[in-house]
Amino acid sequence: MSQFSSAARGLLLVGAAAATALPAAAQSTKTPKYSNEFLNIGVGARALGMGKVQVSLADNATAGYWNPAGLTNQTHKYDGVLMHSELFSGVVKNDYAAFSMPLDDKSDIGVSVMRLGVDNIADTRNLINEYGYVDYSKIEYFSVADYALLLSYARKIDKVEGLSVGANAKIIYRNIGKFAHGYGFGIDAGVQYNHKGWNLALMARDITTTFTQWTINSDEYLKGINSTVANNGDAIPTNSAEITLPRFVLGAGRRFDIGLRKEFTALVAVDLEATTDGQRGTPISTKIVSVDPRLGVELGYKNLVFLRGGAGNYQKIQDFAPNANGTYNSSWKGQYSLGAGVAVSGLRIDLALSRLAVEKLGSTSQTNSLIVSLGYGFK
């Protein structure tokens, strides 16, 4: 228990540091919807192919992200995962890497690194020179990127077989070229319980709330502009603190053996994700909490080949144009995904294809996002 206590004290120190990290220079504090939303896109092609249904199932290095308690259930001593995906026709790059290992016979640790970014954005503010001519040499390029580092700890509970708890210490860095950057700190906590084929779990993200302190470089905003406002009269942002409110994910899954030889398996799981940052257009929507249900299915053959599918992210979307009565129609739209995987001698190769709905002036089109991840467990 001494190691558990030491780890717990370490997480509490990180939480205390987060609570005191807001400098006096901060001029405002905000609790916006979708704060640090890059952390909720998801990681690992297996999970994304199952509609992001994973908190009760994660049992390898990806558990550091989905539910750190699952680190105690990994089947190999060491496990690593790499993922690359391109969203919105390749405009947004999403990269992820994770590694996990046991600390002793009852506890495990892990580290995860994430980056979501858009690169080579053209800054054309100074495209017109002082003589009124276009000067392409004046174009500069910058990137907008979000980074996260997760340090995970998990431990089995001796008194209840199959029960594990875990926590993440989370460090965030967000960058908007030379214009602004932010640092954030927070803590996640999770529980996972596995018994007779059933998988139950609860994950609490940003349980202490996550603080992100933004610093604005006003000189860069005004570069080449002879006024106190940015383009089109927009006021220059000021230093501020952004607070990410907690979200909770309750998950349950069940594995079935199919056939006389039990060569085929079917895994069915559901997640209920509850957000507390304001009313959203989800199937269960209140001013206090909004709940998004998700469903994931995985079919396996001899634990070698897998086919997956998922559905979730249902939103009530209102049409842009009014109907003949002058009112606006609304409809439910969801996000669906497919996936496949192969696992041989500890090596895992997973693919996922996600259909993202895009609204274009009242019509709906679909874009495909391809996710590829590679995992390897050894010893």
Image: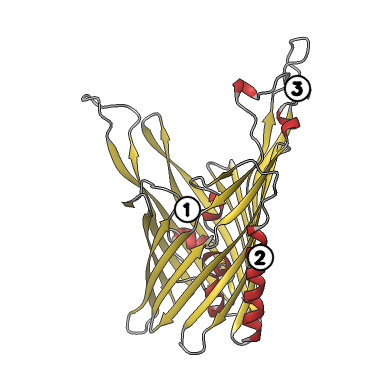
Contact (CB < 8 A) between labels 2 and 1?
no
Residue 377: percent from left, percent from top: 61, 75
User: Looking at the picture, which amino acid does disc 3 mark?
Assistant: Gly
Q: Residues within 10 Å of mark 3 (few under 14, many from 20)?
A: few
Rendered image coloring scheme: secondary structure
Which one is closest to the eye, mark 2 or mark 3? 2
Is 281 on the left or on the right of 4, as rendered?
A: left
User: Looking at the picture, which amino acid does disc 2 mark?
Assistant: Val
Q: CA distance from mark 1 to mark 3?
A: 44 Å
> For numbered disc 2, what is the local secondary structure?
helix
Residue 111: percent from left, percent from top: 65, 67
Q: Earlier in the sequence, mark 2 or mark 3?
A: 2
> For numbered disc 3, what is the local secondary structure?
loop
> Which residue corresponds to mark 2?
14
Which one is closest to the eye, mark 2 or mark 1? 2
The residue nearer to you, when weighing 336 against 217, is: 217
The residue nearer to you, when weighing 253 against 339, is: 253
Look at 53% across and 72% down and name the residue there: 343
> Which residue corresponds to mark 1?
353
Look at 48% across and 74% down and name the residue there: 191
> Which residue corresponds to mark 3?
224
User: Looking at the picture, which amino acid does disc 1 mark?
Assistant: Leu
Contact (CB < 8 A) between labels 1 and 3?
no
Q: Earlier in the sequence, mark 2 or mark 1?
A: 2
Q: Quadrant of the C terminus?
A: bottom right
